Image (cartoon, rainbow, N blue to C red):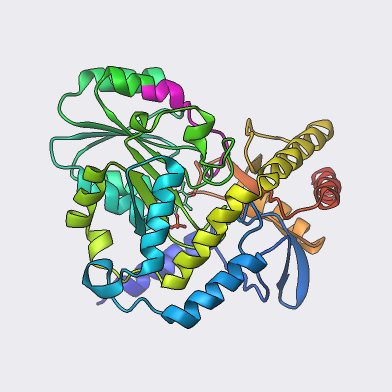
Amino acid sequence: MAGFSERLAALLQQRRRDDLYRQRQTLQSAQGPVVRVDGLEYLNFCSNDYLGLAAHPRVIERFRQAAVEYGVGSGASHLVCGHSAPHHALEEALAAFTGRERALLYSSGYTANTGILTALLQRGDHVFEDRLNHASLLDGGLHSGARFQRFAHNDVRALEAKLARADGPRLVVVDGVFSMDGDTAPLAELARVCRMHDAWLMVDDAHGFGVLGERGVGSTEAARLAPDAVPILMATLGKALGTAGAFVAGSEQLIEGLIQQSRNYIYTTALPPAVAAASLEALALVTEEAWRRDYLATLIHRFRLGAEQLGLPLLPSASAIQPLLVGDASRALALSARLRERGFLIGAIRPPTVPAGTSRLRITLSAAHSETQVDQLLDQLAACWAAD
Ligand SMILES: *Cc1c(COP(=O)(O)O)cnc(C)c1O
């Protein structure tokens, strides 16, 4: 009796019954405001390509050149012989851009977060995480061996009460921009509380990096925080930068410590060097083309204004993530399907990704969208909500 087969059958059946079954769609085009699925074109409002760099000609060209020079695979882990010049140049550029001593690349945001937390934390330490943190942060904290405590979303006073009761090394971990709600962490207050209680603050800025702040450094720049207020800054390259991978930026000591003992860094093949080279080009575009951030901000404003006038259930988000709260999973799924019939790709986010009863349409805007496309989206949302 294996048992596994019965267990899987029960899982799949339950997921279907609860309208929580997940399915992939296969894209037949590059990422962009218009994508092709099953031979049909859709307006894409669910990608994290916030600045429209995933298929930018300069990023593609740099990738192509680096592939010719460095090949496709990195060949080994960073500590063996997989660390190449493009990786090194990208780490130095990211450190300079974020104003940190050093930066270290990981193959993905998921492995970075679990890798940082499990390497840094030990039994006897305390880790405090916002309840709505990304799964990779929660998983890393849970598996770290430290005492793991969640605090209510963005509730600095609740956090402070927990910090006051804990002793020994303390780490507070938050998303800069929350991935399913689009709201931001109160970083200045969090930094103040951490300083008062001698705790370290770690910020995962997957959705702020490249987008927020005057230069696009992200949530910490927008909150005007000095580098030492956030000893561990992590962000991903697969969102606004349009490439893949992730990095952590901090002190020389932090980065050397991770190189010595972060298992997710040590025991895995380095990113393809061409991905690092393409990321360098994307980072240059973030700096050179500030208009992408400004234009994205005008689209966000336009969308929120329109949605408000239509009475759509907006959440308090100022970011490119503009979820519409639906509640019921099957209703969210039905709305997403109806929008798809009308040529709009928008994901229905359901439990366990979000708490039960808070299923939503997660709309994401990009600097690659036009104002007309945003207006078309609003028209279709109005029609679908009215028909509901
Ligand atoms: C996407 C995301 C990650 C994971 O990054 P990947 O590079 O996709 O693995 C981590 N944290 C947050 C907040 C994210 O949104």
Magenta span = 179-191
Instruction: Find residue 376 and report its horizontal and vertical position in percent.
Output: 85, 51
* Residue 244 to residue 320: above or below: below
Query: Can residue 135 be seen in the rendering of this structure?
Result: no
Q: Is residue 170 magenta?
A: no
Residue in the foreground of this view, choosing between 319 and 146: 319
Q: How many marks?
A: 0
Query: Can residue 319 be seen in the rendering of this structure?
Result: yes
Report the magenta stretch's main SS. Answer: loop
Dividing the picture into quadrants, the one containing residue 150 is: top left
Horizontal arrangement in the rendering, residue 259 relative to residue 136 (left or right): left
Q: Residue at x 36, y 71 (%)?
A: 6
Dividing the picture into quadrants, the one containing residue 174 is: top left
Residue in the foreground of this view, choosing between 266 and 166: 266
* Residue 362 to residue 231: above or below: below
Instruction: Find residue 368 and report its horizontal and vertical position in percent.
Output: 72, 55
Q: Is residue 184 magenta?
A: yes
Instruction: Find residue 289 and report its horizontal and vertical position in percent.
Output: 66, 49
Q: Residue at x 44, y 42 (%)?
A: 98
Image quadrant where one finds the N terminus: bottom left
Horizontal arrangement in the rendering, residue 330 relative to residue 158 (left or right): right
Residue in the foreground of this view, choosing between 145 and 110: 110
Q: Residue at x 83, y 35 (%)?
A: 310
Q: Residue at x 86, y 47 (%)?
A: 379
Residue in the foreground of this view, choosing between 190 and 94: 94
Instruction: Find residue 292 and report its horizontal and vertical position in percent.
Output: 68, 48
Dividing the picture into quadrants, the one containing residue 2 is: bottom left
